[in-house]
């Protein structure tokens, strides 16, 4: 399918640049729906756009609840608020969950690349105990065996790819709001945009 | 129904205090589910706990999509990340939507109090054009007629009350995570807590 750079993308890259002095500028909140039909929401880290596409990469642990959520209902909405420039991006779309059992060798390569692109420290967490389960004692978290920097993805490592379908941009400094929608006509993607009331 | 101060509440008040030098420390992301079954997520502002309860107050515009979402499915999850102390609170529960047509006079009083507790500037936005609709022109937003500071709530003003059911606390500095759950036995509320793996 043809891919064009979405018109909201330069806004987002500008925001990332303008807020890059803040560690949390790459953090956003990802909302999903649990198998019990309840909304769920947590902070995750923006990694990168996938190659030249508009797809947003997120690394996560296969054992976290969000995977169960997404396997049940593969749609999410990102809310990304930039605290210095007072801009919000709401980005919704389908999410592709790529774990080690994925049958698509291209996707397994993407997962492997995401693994090696992440820091050794962040890789280590995928070797730790299962997130959300009761801690067995009050000891500090056991550090797993040292990481072999050349070792491929841990079993628990999962790559999420969110393919944006709609983007709502809000600038609280100038009170501007723009709604972007994706359209697919003859397998070609195009984006419409409209100024809306904040 | 009996109400006890929840054990997570002092953690949250500490975080608010520790991050109070940051304007955005009172902002969090509220996830809901739309009538189309899709997750929705946006930034809102924490106002206050309601009286001595654990209920979280949010002001919003009756004309925003979140009202439609909540009227359809009255549950939400807050994700509140404190950027200076590296703490995250995920808070889910049922949401009571209190607009001017509410038949409960106590709730109407709460809505009126929330109105007068908000700044004149924030009250003005409820007199503006309908959020999310196309902007009619490229003119700056028309400022509505001056606000009468003694006038009661605008029709579009809506008070949301989220009654926490579960709270997931994560501290990224010491890698501590605690899961809090509410239990109601014989109309008395109690809270259990458990340390879980981060």
Image: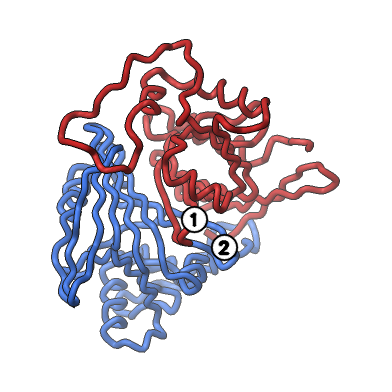
Chain colours: A red, B blue
Q: Residues within 10 Å of mark 2 (few under 14, many from 20)?
A: some
Residue at screen point 23% across, 46% down: B178
Q: Chain of mark 2?
A: B
**Residue A128 can be seen in this image:** yes
**Contact between labelled residues 1 and 2, with CB atoms less than 8 Å apart:** yes
Q: Are marks 2 and 1 on the same chain?
A: no
Nearer the observer, A21 or B2: B2
Q: Chain of mark 1?
A: A
What residue is shown with label 1? A33
Question: x, y (%) of residue B132?
Answer: 57, 62
Q: Which mark is residue B93?
A: none
What residue is shown with label 2? B37
Quarter where residue A2 is shown: top right
Residue at screen point 41% across, 72% down: B146
Residue at screen point 45% across, 50% down: A172
Residue at screen point 32% across, 56% down: B91
Is label 1 in a helix, a strand or a loop? strand
Question: x, y (%) of residue A15?
Answer: 50, 36
B3 to B182, vertically: above or below: below
Q: Is residue B96 left or right of residue A34?
A: left
């Amino acid at each position: 399918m043809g891919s064009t750079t979405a018109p909201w993308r330069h806004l987002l890259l500008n925001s990332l640049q303008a807020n890059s002095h803040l560690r949390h500028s790459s953090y956003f909140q990802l909302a999903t729906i649990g198998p019990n039909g309840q909304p769920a929401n947590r902070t995750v880290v923006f990694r990168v756009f996938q190659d030249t596409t508009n797809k947003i990469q997120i690394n996560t642990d296969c054992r976290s609840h969000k995977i169960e959520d997404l396997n049940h209902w593969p749609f999410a909405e990102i809310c990304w608020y930039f605290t210095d420039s007072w801009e919000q991006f709401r980005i919704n779309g389908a999410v592709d969950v790529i774990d080690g059992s994925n049958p698509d060798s291209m996707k397994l390569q993407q997962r492997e690349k995401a693994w090696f692109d992440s820091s050794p420290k962040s890789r280590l967490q995928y070797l730790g105990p299962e997130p959300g389960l009761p801690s067995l004692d009050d000891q500090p978290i056991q550090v797993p065996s040292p990481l072999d920097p050349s070792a491929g993805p841990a079993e628990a490592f999962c790559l999420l790819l969110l393919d944006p379908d709609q983007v709502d941009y809000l600038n609280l400094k100038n009170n501007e709001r723009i709604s972007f929608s994706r359209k697919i006509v003859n397998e070609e993607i195009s984006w419409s945009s409209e100024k809306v009331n904040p």
